[in-house]
Image (cartoon, rainbow, N blue to C red):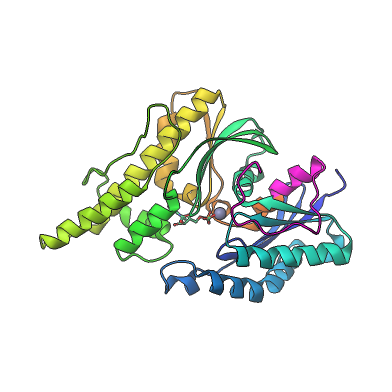
Amino acid sequence: MNEIRRILAVESSCDETSAAVLEGRVVRSNIISTQIEIHKKYGGVVPEVASRKHFENIIPVVDAALEKAGCTLEEIDGFAVTHGPGLVGALLIGLTYVKSLAFALEKPFLGVNHIEGHIAANYIEHPELVPPFVCLVASGGHSHLVKVIDYDRFEILGRTRDDAAGEAFDKVARALGLGYPGGPNIEKLALEGDPKAIRFPRAALEEGSFDFSFSGLKSAVLNYLNSMEMRGEEVNKADVAASFQQAVTEVLAEKLIRAAEESGSPYAVLAGGVASNKKLREEVQRKGKGKDLKVLFPSPVLCTDNAAMIGCAAHYRFMKGYHSDMELNAMPNLRIGD
Ligand code: KG4
Ligand code: ZN
């Protein structure tokens, strides 16, 4: 389906309403309206509030994406939208809007898996990247080690058994009184701390396993904070942030590099909100040094939720002939490869 050249993509799975226009895999616009300020006061995303905000924002965000790209709706060849995983009410806003556009304009549309979108963010800026390769997707909802066999074929090598990496950042940040979203706040505070100050546990799990577990680490941080408080000792929050970040990024980087090596992947690729963490990027580069591996990651704006990555994933799927039909529903628990 090569004739689907210009794609309008929409992402509304969590707390960002985003729309993008792509020509092939070239991004002409990528508008992101974030709700972070609204959810901050609740310490996390409130699903009902998120849906309401997506409803208010979707039309202006799509209009802005078209305007920035200098094209009209009639000039769009195909539509793409995240249909899962995510918050069902939030997903439904984007999905319903895109289905209506596709129906009214009699153009094809495609539901895209959000995690697949995060991986596809890497194709936008790294034209040399082609499957097969190994990618670590680490975000607020997911921590997956994925073997990308082809643009539409994935094998899960490992996943988290409890908290996602971003979730651990968010929970530890809350305990430190840093607010939502935790990742960027921890990263900032960690710059002033000593990563070796406190030795928090690294859960390696069984030998050879590519799964992750972050709940033990999170509990260790909470226990440390409680015991310091009970002893009346002052906590050096920057040291806690730096030591926690060190523990998370070491485990993520070690497993990504090992998975890439064992799979014979020429690339070790990062994706998802946590991939914008500089310490993680450095750790992966450090552990990959001297190995026959190229480390790739997207720019920070393409790591966190955005519609350009959804459009890019759709670009490759449209080329392979995939289309969705009007029966497509939001799938909050959609898994990669489904
Ligand atoms: O990919 P994303 O925007 O949304 C999901 O699909 O979940 O990821 C958001 C997550 C949040 O948990 C946030 O704390 C984390 O990514 N995050 C970071 C950083 N920026 C965002 N974690 C660590 N360091 C960062 N710089
Ligand atoms: Zn995401």
Instruction: Identify the residue shown where x is 60% and y is 75%.
Output: 52
| Residue 222 x, y percent position in the rendering | 26, 56
The magenta-colored residue range is: 312-338
What is the residue that sits farthest to the left in this orientation? 231
| Residue 130 x, y percent position in the rendering | 67, 33
Instruction: Identify the residue shown where x is 38% and y is 38%.
Output: 251
Residue 12 vs residue 294: left or right?
A: right
Residue 291 vs residue 196: left or right?
A: right
Magenta includes 322? Answer: yes
Q: Main secondary structure of the magenta part?
A: loop
- Hey, which quadrant is residue 327 in on the image? bottom right
Task: Name the quadrant of the C terminus.
Answer: top right
The vertical placement of 277 against 294, above or below, is: below
The vertical placement of 160 against 295, above or below, is: below
Pick the front one: 96 or 62: 96
Counting labels gives 0
Instruction: Identify the residue shown where x is 21% and y is 53%.
Output: 224
| Residue 13 x, y percent position in the rendering | 60, 60
Magenta includes 316? Answer: yes
| Residue 26 x, y percent position in the rendering | 72, 49
Pick the front one: 70 or 1: 1
Residue 331 visible in image: yes
Pick the front one: 41 or 336: 336
Task: Name the quadrant of the N terminus.
Answer: top right
- Hey, which quadrant is residue 64 in on the image? bottom right
Residue 191 visible in image: no
